[in-house]
Image (spheres, rainbow, N blue to C red):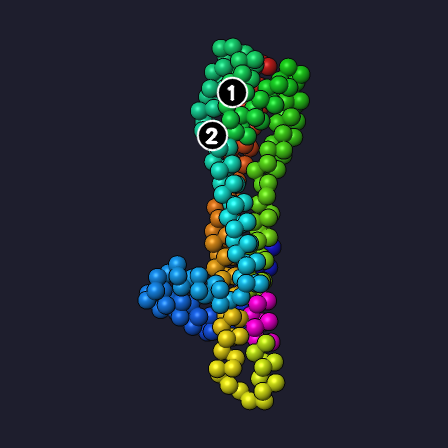
Amino acid sequence: MKRSFSILAMSGLFVLGTNTASAVTLIQDDAAAKGFTQVLKEQFIQGGASFMGIVLLCLILGLAVAIERIIFLNMATTNTTKLKEAVEAALKSGGVEAAKDLCRDTKGPVASIFYQGLDRAGESVESAEKAVVAYGGVQMGQLEKNVSWLSLFIAIAPMLGFMGTVIGMIQAFQKIAAVGNLSASLIAGDIQVALLTTVFGLITAIILQIFYNYIIAKIDGIVNDMEDSSIALIDMLVDIKK
């Protein structure tokens, strides 16, 4: 999906690059005179409530998903080095039950995976390893929850902008055909709407893409910690069995 979005965005920028740059320059000039918030509001209204409202909804929903994921991932992040040392010390001093109590009182997916592995430690190391692998997949699903919605909003926002552009250009050409002559004042409003929907759609996609990349990097880091910690846990259990 990211590749499709990139191709779509580059194609749109290639076709409308000059006009879009002019629109952005106009917004910047107005912002210098009136204030950014006021100009943004005016340009949003001029862009039309139909498509601009949907683009704004994509931005709001996307930011809501992004903020929820960031909070969840930050809460799921633990100091795995200290946790492994604490579990190893608990295994040596109090056995499996002491290590399970420690993991039960610790938040995060790594501690949960440790608990599942320790809970099967009484059966065999192979059973513990299977439990760690299975529960690791469950935890990975929890980490990636709702991220697909964020990527959907990233793809939809510029598409809606391009659709508004196409509709605006169609309306402009319809006026030209109806009147029978080319007048800049006749079609200026439709062209402006076309450009504004594209600009706001791309801005929305860029903002959400930044959050998306941060979330994916955060998930990758946690998953790597889960894999390393799982290997360390199995090594601890093997040492206990010896």
Dots 1 and 2: beta carbons under 8 Å?
no
Residue 196: image tag = none
Work out whether residue 138 can be spotted. Answer: yes
Work out whether residue 10 can be spotted. Answer: no
Q: Which amino acid does label 1 sit on?
A: Asp
Secondary structure under tag 1 reads loop
Q: Which residue is drawn at 51% across and 86% down?
A: 183
Q: Residue furthest bottom?
A: 180
Sequence-wise, the earlier of marks 1 and 2 is 2
Q: Which amino acid does label 2 sit on?
A: Thr
**Majority secondary structure of the magenta segment?**
helix
Residue 105: image tag = 1
The relative height of residue 201 versus residue 99 in the rendered view (above or below) is: below
Q: Position of residue 140 (x, y in %)?
A: 59, 36
Residue 78: image tag = 2
Q: Which residue is drawn at 48% across and 83% down?
A: 184
Disc 1 to disc 2, C-alpha distance: 13 Å
The relative height of residue 96 versus residue 11 in the rendered view (above or below) is: above
Location of the N terminus (image quadrant): bottom right
Q: Which residue is drawn at 51% across and 10% down?
A: 94
Residue 125 quadrant = top right
